[in-house]
Image (cartoon, rainbow, N blue to C red):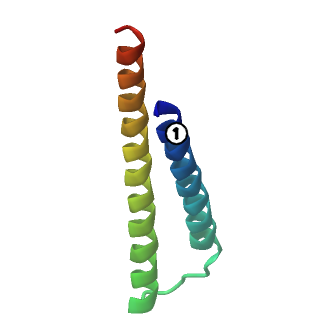
Amino acid sequence: MFMEIAIGAIGIGVVLMVGYLVIAQVRAALPITGTDNASNATKAGLASTQATVFAGFGLIAVGIIVLAAFGLISIFK
């Protein structure tokens, strides 16, 4: 059971990593210049998306740590 959960967590982590890389590349490639509202909204939207992906990374890390702790507890029972 722990193996399936760990594999699922790793899969979600891979998806988040790919999403982060895509968002980072789009943010770097967009020629956002000027001070109009569309440029500022685009910058804010991409920054918010990256922050959401960072939060996902944190949740995955905590999940893996908790999973490892439960695995160790069950091994030493």
State the residue at coordinates (52%, 56%).
16
Query: In the depicted view, which residue is nearer to us: 4 or 38?
Result: 4
Q: Residues within 10 Å of mark 1 (few under 14, many from 20)?
A: few
Q: Amino acid at mark 1?
A: Glu
Image location of residue 30, percent across then percent down: 61, 79
Disc 1: which residue: 4
Confirm whether residue 56 shows in the render.
yes
**Relative to 51, is 30 above or below?**
below
**Relative to 31, is 57 above or below?**
above
Query: In the depicted view, which residue is nearer to us: 68 or 74?
Result: 74
State the residue at coordinates (36%, 22%).
69
Confirm whether residue 36 shows in the render.
no
Query: In the depicted view, which residue is nearer to us: 41 or 65?
Result: 65
Image location of residue 31, percent across then percent down: 61, 81
Query: In the depicted view, which residue is nearer to us: 10 or 18?
Result: 10
State the residue at coordinates (53%, 33%).
3
For the C terminus, the quadrant is top left
Image location of residue 21, percent across then percent down: 61, 59
